[in-house]
Amino acid sequence: MWSTSSLALSVALSVAVTAALPPPRPATPALHPIIANGSSVAVPYMCEAFLFCSVAEPTCQVQWRDPSNAPLPAWSPTASRYHLGSGKHLPHDYLVFHDFLQEQEGLYTCVARCGAGQEGRASVTLTFEPQSVPCP
Ligand SMILES: *[C@@H]1O[C@H](CO)[C@@H](O)[C@H](O)[C@H]1NC(C)=O
């Protein structure tokens, strides 16, 4: 059976031990990349399209993924879709379609990443606009 004094000692010790521990780490805040174009965009056939994603945290990075979750390639003369950007001070990335085609429809995701496994996503659905409206 515990005497009052040993209980008091044990409480005092556990308070001392708790006080010696580093403060609990704040929960890792979620990242919220922003797609400037909203959650769905209709792109006319064979038109160029730029979609813009950025994240407010300057030390993070953003990257566009295609509907199969593969990262978009960098620009090349033959790429029909590619990414441009990833600047450091306002991390951002453009998703660019040279000539938008029906098979490129789908959900494109902007992934923001920081060190220590911090990650956030935003997505936009791109749909094909079949009418031959003039390109914007
Ligand atoms: C998406 O937003 C960016 C930045 O505001 C703009 O430059 C671009 O034209 C927009 N794209 C489309 C397809 O509306």
Image (cartoon, grey):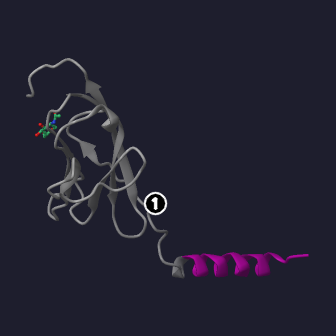
Q: Dot 1: within a 10 Å radius of its alpha carbon, few (fewer than 14), some, or many (20 or more) residues?
A: few
Q: Which residue is drawn at 28% across and 27% down?
A: 128
Q: Residue at x 38, y 52 (%)?
A: 120
In the rendered image, the vertical position of residue 59 relative to residue 79, given as above or below: below
The residue labelled by disc 1 is 27
**Residue 35 located within the stretch drawn in magenta:** no
Q: Residue 30: in sight, yes or no?
A: no
Q: What element carries label 1?
A: loop
Q: Residue 123: in sight, yes or no?
A: yes
Q: Where is residue 88 in the image (x, y as percent from the top left)?
A: 17, 65
In the rendered image, the vertical position of residue 50 relative to residue 60, given as above or below: above
Q: Which amino acid does label 1 sit on?
A: Ala
Q: Position of residue 94 (x, y in %)?
A: 18, 49
In the rendered image, the vertical position of residue 17 relative to residue 94, given as above or below: below
Q: State the quadrant of the N terminus.
A: bottom right
Q: Position of residue 89 (x, y in %)?
A: 14, 63
Q: Which residue is drawn at 71% across and 81% down?
A: 9
Question: Left or right: where does residue 113 sit relative to residue 34?
Answer: right
Q: Is the magenta stretch mostly helix, strand or loop?
A: helix
**Residue 9 located within the stretch drawn in magenta:** yes
- Which quadrant does ligand 1 occupy? top left
Residue at the outermost front position: 78
Q: What are the residue bounds of the magenta stretch?
A: 1-18
Q: Quadrant of residue 58?
A: bottom left
Foreground pick, 4 / 26:
26
Q: State the quadrant of the C terminus.
A: top left
Q: Residue at x 78, y 81 (%)?
A: 6
